Amino acid sequence: MEIDTAASGAMLKRERVRKAILELVEARRPGDAIPSERVLCARLGVSRPTLRAAVDELVVAGLLVREHGRGMFVAEEKITQELVSDRSAFSLPPAGGVWTSRLLELRTLPAGARVGRRLRVSPTAEIRYAARLRLVDGSPMAIEHLHIRADLVPDLTGEDLEQGDLYEHLRDRHGIQVGEAVQSIEPTVVTRAEADLLDVPEFSPALLFERLTMDTRDRPVEYVHSLYRGDRYRIVSRLTLGPGAEPPASAEGHHPGIPPGDFTSRDPVTFSARGVVQHGI
């Protein structure tokens, strides 16, 4: 598959605008206003369509709210349901198919406030940023945006990101053993540039993954957010219910897909999850 350079450039520019707006959102409280589109275009040096595409994505994601005649505001915080499991019971087998990567961009840049908070480094500290297109059996499946502390991988190359396993590279070349990761998944839709790269119609459904990976010394190593095709990729969870399960850290709330009250005895739940590539579509 040949990569559309125009689509790639548009997607990367929109990604930089998205990050800048997210920093504004995270520095404010729900209900606070953010600058107007005109002000943001001048501040970020981008066109109105580019800015609007990034804002539209954040509105769809529920992070911004547009109010006609008033402007844009930070949305109310989302309700988060965490799946808690005993570490010995959690597993994440790889998805099916042959996975390969095509590098879209690799550069060293300042972390910025938002990524710096996640990686526990100064906003001016250098990180290695990479964008890559992930393919399954030659078909585009996902767009990944990786942020890795530059001091941990000073010689990371494009070849490292296109061949082999990144975590194996961290272990074998840099002595970094990953320990655990916290990952969230949300529904979203793709922009025109993302649609061109993923070979799907604009506004097609997608899954947005965000992951923070720690090493065995409890250091943040990698912050990633990825966009997976909603028509080809799904997550399957296996729940172990009742007395045989290890008790979760907290019995408050309810489990996704299981209505409140279904487990009035507060029986514990453990789970395993795996990604599934849907073929023949």
Image: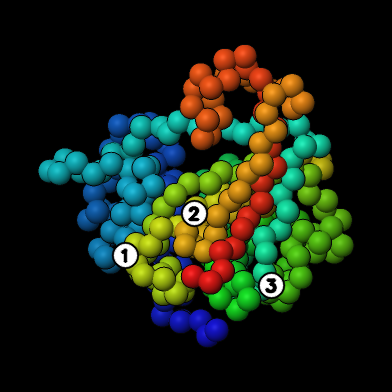
Q: Amino acid at mark 1?
A: Thr
Name which residue lies at 27% across and 46% down: 35
Name which of mark 3 and mark 2 comes first in the sequence: 3
Q: Residue furthest bottom?
A: 2
Residue at the image point whose x is 73% and y is 68% from the top:
156
* Rendered position, 250 above or below 106: above
The N terminus, quarter of image: bottom right
**Residue 188 image point, x, y percent:** 41, 53
Identify which residue, 51 or 244, lies in the foreground: 244
Residue shown at 51%/35% (left/top)?
257
Q: x, y percentage for residue 264?
A: 57, 15
Mark 1 crowdedness (10 Å alpha carbons): few <14, some 14-19, many ≥20: some
SS category of the residue bearing label 3: loop
CB contact under 8 Å: marks 1 and 2: no
Q: Which of disc 3 and disc 1 is earlier in sequence?
A: 1
> From this viewpoint, is residue 140 visible?
yes
Task: Tell me if 117 is positioned left or right of 198 in this view.
Answer: right
Type of the residue with mark 2: Leu
Considering only order in the chain, which callout, 2 or 1, is on the residue closer to the N terminus?
A: 1
- Mark 3 — residue? 98
The dot on residue 207 is 2
Question: Quadrant location of residue 249?
Answer: top right
Disc 1 from disc 3: Cα separation: 34 Å
- Residue at mark 1 to residue at mark 2: CA–CA distance: 22 Å
Q: Tell me if residue 182 comes above or below residue 99 in the rendering.
A: above
In the picture of the structure, the residue carrying the numbered disc 1 is 50
Task: Choose top left, top right, bottom left or bottom right for residue 120.
Answer: top right
Q: Is residue 233 above or below residue 218?
A: below
CA separation in Å, label 3 and label 2: 20 Å
The x and y percentages for residue 77 are 41, 32
Expressed as whole percent of the image width and height from the top left, the position of residue 91 reads 74, 45
- Would you say 191 lies left or right of 107 here? left
